[in-house]
């Protein structure tokens, strides 16, 4: 009996929908005088052991036994609305909705104010797409049990789904108003304290749902207010913190997002997800050193999880979480040209999952970026062999959700490009021609073919090949961006601009096209062009906040608009994201000069010029994961012009 009582109390504490006082405390002795008839809210002594057996069976997912025991209990207590509602809950879990309906009807006929029965009836009405009936039941549940948060949350969800956001906000506010009184009344009562804590957590969850709804519908101020209310209801609630941090990060409020993530990290100091989020925010701010520091923290966690002889698989979830976090940090490090740090992160993950295709693919990118294209080509080819050997079986676990066929094609493309960079230009071109013939509508393959032609000094021929493919496949919008890039490299700038506008007509969120058009308009310098460019580049930055080339374009545009302080901040970020880029350094020098920082401007111009002089060792090519959607390398395209401009500026500043 002690075991049964403990199990029952545990189940109730863990959130049984039918909140009541502990059943053992409400047993009525045989022969008690009833007085005036009221709804029966107790369980009699004869029914009690059946009730406890039912709870134990329910906890063990033995729903058949649970239903049988509850029916036995109802033989003794046929007028217990509580038992009818508990049985209805079990029947719902068995998908016996009609039987559950009958039990709920019995419960409500015995006690029209029975909150749990109204709550379950409301859920059934929602499943039947009966919003009016559901709303009435949830409202009745709230009136019956004003401190039970379940009905509030269900009602808020229902109202949001029907578009009645004002009513949903009112219900959420009403729940929020219950938090403080419940907390104050629970100071010396353990059971009341548990109930108050649950009320606080659920109130926070309701405000989080409101915040997400407002954010999705574009009302940032209302979303911020809702997230603040969630934090007020439960300041340390992890779900509220991560929802607000994600929202702030998406709105580029990085300092506030970082503060929320740090509070989460204080609760979960070894959470790979939170560490990866902090790395992501640091990268968006251009703090690449902080990203590398977060990667080192993840590497330390990975080292403690490395499998040893005879090690069991009981930490598989931890290994997966750390490996995913390392990969999510490594990819932007590649984009920021921190290939050595990226390679270390990926090799740490590969020690947990040797030969994993996704991890191996990005490690191969790091090798190419570090100037080791032959090793990279061999690594890509090993990924290709591994994927082919798996046949129909997908990689397990799949960290980024990349389809095996897509990863296989990417590996083939990157292997061919790496061969070209290793000096095997004919082999590279041969492979890419074959891949383009097989996949004529793939943007990545078309861009890779363009690079192979351009490397051989045949950009004009690439333009002809791609233009013919666009004519042959007019439905393939993905070919337009490669065609525009080819036209740019072939010196057909006006044609390229027109093609890039067609890209946006088909794909309004194409960051590469947004950047190309925005930068081209910025170079023109007319006020109308600059205003259009600012809008396009702001969208591109929002889509790819960790891209140094896009940050540079946006900063250059702000500078041309006369907003020197904003431009300087963005161009400093671009320089941190993409170091050793002479075009970025030239624009940074202009912004420093506009801000009255002559000596710093001179330093930036000198660094840029050093990178453009013959024999200088400029930054390595960007990771192909980035290059597939980046604009042409402006330093390669416009190097002589950029050099001449910088020399002129230096001569004027420091004769």
Image: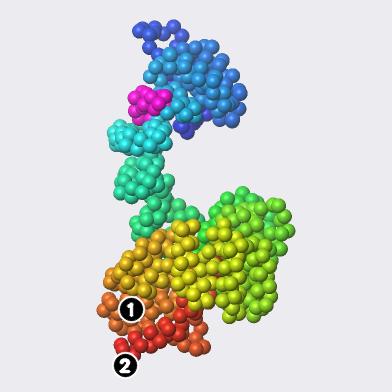
Q: Residue 542's quadrant in the figure?
A: bottom left
Label drawn at residue 590: 1
Query: The residue tagged with tag 2: helix, strand or loop?
Result: loop
Label 2: how many residues lie within 10 Å, few (<14), some (14-19) or many (20+)? few
Which residue is depicted at the point 40% across and 20% down?
114
Q: Earlier in the sequence, mark 1 or mark 2?
A: 1
Decide whether residue 136 is among the magenta residues: yes
Residue furthest left as drawn = 596
**Left or right relative to 334: residue 469:** right
Relative to the observer, which residue lies in front, 443 or 422? Answer: 443
Please tell me which residue is depicted at 36% across the width and 49% down the height of the picture. 218
Residue 461: give x, y in percent of width and height: 59, 75
The quarter holding residue 456 reads bottom right
- Secondary structure beneath dot 1 equals helix
- Front-most of 12 and 157? 157
Q: Residue at x 32, y 37 (%)?
A: 166
For the question of whether residue 97 can be seen, the reply is yes
Residue bounds of the magenta highlight: 132-148
- Residue in view at x 49 percent, y 13 percent: 77
User: Which residue is denoted by mark 2 in the rendering?
Assistant: 655
């Amino acid at each position: 009996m002690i075991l049964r009582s403990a199990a029952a109390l545990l189940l109730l504490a863990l959130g049984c929908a039918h909140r009541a006082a502990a059943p053992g405390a409400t047993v009525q002795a045989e022969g008690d005088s009833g007085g005036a008839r009221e709804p029966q809210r107790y369980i009699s002594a004869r029914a009690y052991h059946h009730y406890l057996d039912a709870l134990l069976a329910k906890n063990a997912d033995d729903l058949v036994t649970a239903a049988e025991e509850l029916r036995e209990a109802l033989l003794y207590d046929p007028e217990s609305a509580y038992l009818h509602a508990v049985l209805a809950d079990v029947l719902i879990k068995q998908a016996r909705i009609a039987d559950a309906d009958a039990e709920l009807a019995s419960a409500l006929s015995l006690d029209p104010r029975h909150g749990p029965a109204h709550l379950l009836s409301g859920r059934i009405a929602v499943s039947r797409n009966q919003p009016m009936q559901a709303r009435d039941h949830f409202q009745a549940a709230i009136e019956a049990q004003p401190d039970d948060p379940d009905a509030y949350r269900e009602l808020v969800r229902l109202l949001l789904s029907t578009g009645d956001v004002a009513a949903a906000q009112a219900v959420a506010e009403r729940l929020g108003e219950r938090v403080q009184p419940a907390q104050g009344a629970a100071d010396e009562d353990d059971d009341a304290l548990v109930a108050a804590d649950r009320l606080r957590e659920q109130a926070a969850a309701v405000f989080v749902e409101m915040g997400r709804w407002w954010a999705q519908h574009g009302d940032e101020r209302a979303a911020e207010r809702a997230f603040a209310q969630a934090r007020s209801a439960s300041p340390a609630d992890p779900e509220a913190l991560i929802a607000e941090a994600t929202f702030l990060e998406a709105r580029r409020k990085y300092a506030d997002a970082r503060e929320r993530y740090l509070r989460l990290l204080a609760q979960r100091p070894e959470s790979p997800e939170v560490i990866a989020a902090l790395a992501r925010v640091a990268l968006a701010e251009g703090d690449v050193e902080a990203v590398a520091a977060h990667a080192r923290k993840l590497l330390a966690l990975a080292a403690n999880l490395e499998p040893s002889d005879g090690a069991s698989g009981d930490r598989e979830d931890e290994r997966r979480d750390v490996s995913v976090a390392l990969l999510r940090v490594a990819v932007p490090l590649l984009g920021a040209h921190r290939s050595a740090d990226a390679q270390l992160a990926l090799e740490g993950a590969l020690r947990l999952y040797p030969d994993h295709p996704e991890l191996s693919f990005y490690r191969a990118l790091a090798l190419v970026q570090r100037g080791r294209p032959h090793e990279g080509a061999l690594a890509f080819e090993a990924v290709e062999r591994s994927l082919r050997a798996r046949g129909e079986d997908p990689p397990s676990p799949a960290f980024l959700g990349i389809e095996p066929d897509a990863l296989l094609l990417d590996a083939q493309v990157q292997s061919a490009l790496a061969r070209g960079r290793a000096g095997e230009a004919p082999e590279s071109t041969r492979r890419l021609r074959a891949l383009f013939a097989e996949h004529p509508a793939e943007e990545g393959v078309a861009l890779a073919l363009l690079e192979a032609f351009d490397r051989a000094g045949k950009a004009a021929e690439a333009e002809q090949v791609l233009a013919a493919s666009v004519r042959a496949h007019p439905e393939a919008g993905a070919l337009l961006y490669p065609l525009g890039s080819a036209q740019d490299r072939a010196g057909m700038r006006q044609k390229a601009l027109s093609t890039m506008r067609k890209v946006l007509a088909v794909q309004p969120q194409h960051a590469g096209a947004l950047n190309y058009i925005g930068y081209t308009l910025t170079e023109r310098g007319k006020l109308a062009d600059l205003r259009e460019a600012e809008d396009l580049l702001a969208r591109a930055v929002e889509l790819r906040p960790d891209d140094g080339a896009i940050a540079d374009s946006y900063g250059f545009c702000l500078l041309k608009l006369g907003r020197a302080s904003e431009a300087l901040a963005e161009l400093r970020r671009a320089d941190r994201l993409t170091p050793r880029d002479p075009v970025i350094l030239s624009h940074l020098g202009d912004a420093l000069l506009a801000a009255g920082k002559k000596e710093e401007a001179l330093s930036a111009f000198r660094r840029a010029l050093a990178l453009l002089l013959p024999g200088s060792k400029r930054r390595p090519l960007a990771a192909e994961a980035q290059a597939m959607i980046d604009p042409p390398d402006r330093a390669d395209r416009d190097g002589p012009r950029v050099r001449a401009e910088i020399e002129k500026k230096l001569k004027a500043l420091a004769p």
